[in-house]
Image: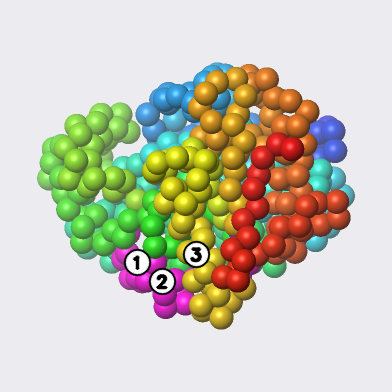
Amino acid sequence: MSFEVNTQYGRIAGVEQEAWLEYRGIPFAKAPVGDLRWKAPQAPEAWEGTYPADQFKAKSVQREGSSPPWDKDFYDDPAFDRPSSEDCLYLNIWAPKEAKDCPVAIWIHGGAFMGGFSSEKEFDGAAYAKRGVILVSIQYRLGIFGFLAHPWLTAEAGTSGNYGMLDQIAAINWVYDNISAFGGDPENITIFGQSAGAMSVQTLISSPLTGDRIKRAILQSGGSYGEGLHRDMTLAEAEQYGLMFSEFLEAQSLEEMRAKSTEEIFAATDPFMAKAMPQAQGLFLTPNIDGILLTDGYYAAIDQGKIKDIPYMLGSTKNDITVEGDPKDPTESPLHRGCLAFSKKLEELGRKPAYVYYFQRNLPGDAQGAWHSAELWYMMGTLGRCWRPFTPEDYALSDRMLDYWCNFMRYGDPNGAGLPEWKPCSKEDGFVEILDVE
């Protein structure tokens, strides 16, 4: 049985589930193909009739496969895979039945700005909808299609290289303008993401382009102050990588670049990356400081109080990337230290400190520990999709985390009846919520 809603662009038919509704593959922008490749996203065309939102759409163009432990956990089931396409700007919605003025959470996937998609095996909004939260998962252009800066592109539009972030902002705007039709409260939107998704969240809370549409933010293994995964990339620096790429593409003009096929562009990516990565010494197809999306560096934006004055929750995992020394000691993790510093800096700005967590459950089934992304099974409530021999204690931890996340999305405070108290991470006591089985 389908459930239909009216949006600004036309009628949409969703799919009824046990206690919630799903709307899959809704276009929030025109397909960024042809002349729209490497341009800011454009509003979608209105449609006649009813749009069937019953299938997840293609993922952004990316390399297939992954490495341990992500390959076996997240990408082992072809039923959850999707073809790659430049036509990838779609979002998915999970909403409670009879929803009314529900808090809204927009999920931004990770993948180093090079991979990932909104309907991966570990992602699902059912557990949120059951708790009265509307969850929206979004897609955005990745890699060379989402973050290529080039002097030709800058000359055309006054900036270049931040297309993937502009996609995310277009999705937020679509949600703000249309989510009331699904029973959501547009004035209570939380954005949250993990890894590059958390880096995206930090970009969005630092950008003047998002206005006041974001009311809360959760940053998982990617949000920080002082040290972490962020790198301040200037537009001029990003353009130099773009010049290098156009040489590999053997293009003499912007018109020639846009005339190349998806396959030709993607084929040029490998040799380009092989040459550029040693120079960059880290991620470089990432958001850049162009004076429009970002007006300053990430930590400078915090220093100057330019990030949004909203409630924050952030954290990392025990065996996260960049961990140094003994993973049992949180102080050995730059990401964890960056989370503590983020909260401390908020207080220095005269704002409320953040809620900080440290996920340290060693996932059963192998010796990978609490690896980067391990918490996703728990805070998405999808343990049942995983091959690992999870215990009743794991399911209890998942329920606790979901309750924390949903309470924060509703109130800006993770605490609630029956939950262990989670205090803000203030300078006075530096409280950190340890997430582990009991």
Disc on res. 342 = 3
Q: Secondary structure at mark 2?
A: helix
Give the extent of the magenta segment: 287-313
Residue at 51% from the left image edge and 79% from the top image edge: 349
What is the total number of numbered labels drawn onto the structure image? Answer: 3
Residue 338: x percent and y percent? 45, 58
Q: Nearer the viewer, residue 198 or 79?
A: 198
Mark 3–mark 1 Cα distance, whole angstroms, equals 15 Å
Tell me which residue sits at (85%, 45%) in the image.
Answer: 97
Secondary structure, magenta segment, majority class:
loop
Q: Secondary structure at mark 3?
A: helix
Instruction: Give the mark toward the camera: 3 or 1.
Output: 3
Residue position marked by numbered label 1 in the rendering: 297
Image location (x, y in percent) of residue 35: 33, 48
From mark 2 to mark 3, how far is it between C-alphas? 12 Å
Label 1 crowding class (10 Å Cα cut-off): few <14, some 14-19, many 20+?
some
Q: Amino acid at mark 1?
A: Gly
**Who's the residue at 80% across and 61% down the image?**
101
Query: In the image, is residue 288 part of the stretch drawn in magenta?
Result: yes
User: Disc 2 or 3, which lies upstream in sequence?
Assistant: 2
Query: Residue 7 at what x, y percent from top left?
Result: 69, 54
Residues at marks 1 and 2 touching, judged by CB atoms closer than 8 Å: yes
* Distance CA(mark 1)–CA(mark 2): 6 Å
Relative to 61, residue 109 above or below: below
Which residue sits furthest bottom? 350
Q: Report x, y in % for residue 230.
A: 37, 55
Q: Nearer the viewer, residue 89 or 437?
A: 437
Q: Is residue 279 left or right of residue 156?
A: left
Residue 434 among those drawn in magenta? no
Q: Is residue 236 visible?
A: yes
Q: Quadrant of the C terminus?
A: top right
Q: Which disc number belongs to residue 301?
A: 2
